[in-house]
Amino acid sequence: MRTTVYSLFDVPSNLVVAFVLLNCLSIETTLVTCAVILVAGGVSSCFLRQQRVSTHMSATLVMATGSRNHTRASENERPLLVSSV
């Protein structure tokens, strides 16, 4: 299962490498393209981390209060951390 997930996440990077190698791009264009992809990845990482922290804080509040009703916006949302205590 872990290998499958790694392979799925590796596909976009392989596509970028293939695109760069198959096209005759100048060094400046390649550098700008890589910089844009790096910035987009960094922004996405910060956004996902912020979502995880807020979800973790909700799960901590659920464990502290023992109630789930007032911490979730809808029943479809699930906390990342569930205590079995």
Image (cartoon, rainbow, N blue to C red):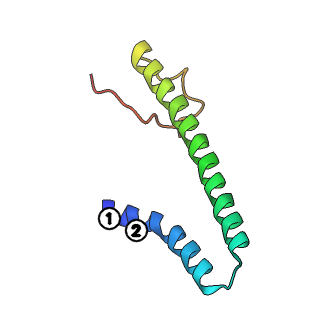
Q: Could you say which is closer to the camera, residue 35 or residue 70?
A: 35
Q: Could you say which is closer to the camera, residue 60 or residue 19?
A: 19
Marks 2 and 1 in Cβ contact (< 8 Å): yes
Name the residue rendered at 28%, 27% in the picture. Answer: 84
User: What residue did someone put label 2 on?
Assistant: 7
Name the residue rendered at 60%, 86% in the picture. Answer: 22
Determine crowd level at label 2: few under 14, some 14-19, many 20+ residues with C-alpha closer than 10 A: few
The image position of residue 14, as x and y in percent, is 50, 73
Task: Give the residue at the far front of this rendering.
Answer: 27
The type of residue carrying mark 1 is: Thr
- Tell me if residue 49 can be seen: yes
Where residue 85 is drawn, which disc sits there?
none
Task: Give the residue at the far top of this rendering.
Answer: 65
Name the residue rendered at 70%, 80% in the picture. Answer: 25
The image position of residue 33, as x and y in percent, is 68, 66
The image position of residue 53, as x and y in percent, is 51, 31
Helix, strand or loop at label 2? It is: helix
Q: Could you say which is closer to the camera, residue 18 or residue 82?
A: 18
Q: Could you say which is closer to the camera, residue 15 or residue 4?
A: 15
